[in-house]
Image (tube, rainbow, N blue to C red):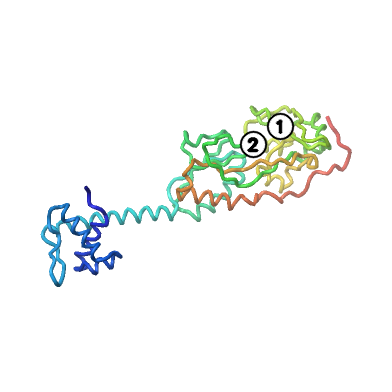
Amino acid sequence: MTTSHLEMDAFVRSADLGSFTAAARALQLTPSALSKLIGRLEARLGVRLLHRTTRKLAPTVEGTLYLERCRQILNAIGDAESEVSRLRERPRGKLRLHAGVAFGTRQLVPRLPHFSQRYPEVQVELNIDDRTVDLFRDGGDIAIRTGPLRDAALVAKKLCDIGQLICASPTYLSRRGIPRTPADLATHNCITMAGIPNLSRWPFDTPSGKKHFDVQGNITVNNAECLVRLAVMGHGLIRINEAAISDEMQQGLLIPVLSDHQCRDAVALHALYPPGHDRLPRVSAMLDFLEATFSSAPWRNVYPGRARPSRPTRAG
């Protein structure tokens, strides 16, 4: 049988204060309960640890040796508990965060310095990639993703909904005309994401309900950032989430079209993390920061207006 933390504490307090009554008061025990703890400890060790007199308790020779070791153990326990408490209260250490290219570069990166200023002891390792990251295999803490949730093993914290927009540059619309109806897309160059068939079928609200229109173009790309760049350069129309183009919309580099026909379906933005990771202070701090930063969808209400044709639409 091993000595308990309480027995050692009872012995040290009794030796320091010289009284069972005073030690019991300090430990919020009755004197008889404390005396039993000391007696049980002495019985297990097979030695007397304290001289008991009518005036004061005093450690024996064996008690003096044991007292020093008990102090070291209790101090080590106290230091360990304090360190763990500090870790719980103060976020620190490396945090591995994953995000897609467009959202990561345009929305997350500009705001990360605010997190670092608030939590300087957290080292953020940001990985920006449009591929789906396996947090268990690759060892990540949080992944920011849009769209349907595919990994039921992860915990999902919803941040907000993101709308989808169809847009093009003023140069392209001046050259090719502004589409009035979804059917007009058949005569336009539509830039899409490679390897994702659903992204070349654009949904619209029609009098008969939701309908998908297949679009075509002479360029496909593998990430949203390239999609935006090509649209700004006047190569064609794109359909993309609003968070990826807020700067271009605000500056008038891209103009939304077909807004009256656009399907109102929004995609959810989630912060995903392995179960239990939210108990880590650094992860909890980042989750709170992401929610506070993006729950209001700060990229909205920055658009100067939608395209309004000043002349008949010209296709071809």
The residue positioned farthest toward the front in the image shown: 32
How many marks can you see?
Answer: 2
Residue in the foreground of this view, choosing between 60 and 110: 60
Comes first in the chain, label 1 or label 2: 1
Could you say where residue 188 lies in the image, as x and y percent from the top left?
79, 31
Above or below for 265 versus 7: above
Residue at 68% of width from left, 30% of height from top? 198
Q: Quadrant of the C terminus?
A: top right
Residue at 21% of width from left, 62% of height from top? 35
The residue positioned farthest toward the bottom in the image shown: 55
Residue in the foreground of this view, choosing between 107 and 260: 260
Residue in the foreground of this view, choosing between 89 and 247: 89
Say what amino acid the circle numbered 2 marks.
Answer: Ala
Give the secondary structure at mark 2. Answer: helix
Mark linked to residue 168: none
Mark linked to residue 191: 1
Could you say where residue 102 lies in the image, as x and y percent from the top left?
62, 40
Judge left or right: residue 186 versus residue 281.
right
Q: Residues within 10 Å of mark 1 (few under 14, many from 20)?
A: many
Say what amino acid the circle numbered 1 marks.
Answer: Ile
Quarter of the figure with residue 209: top right
Residue at 58% of width from left, 34% of height from top? 150
Q: Give the residue pinned by disc 2.
A: 224
Could you say where residue 301 lies in the image, as x and y percent from the top left?
71, 51
Residue at 59% of width from left, 52% of height from top? 293
Q: Residues within 10 Å of mark 2 (few under 14, many from 20)?
A: many
Quarter of the figure with residue 131: top right
Give the secondary structure at mark 1. Answer: loop
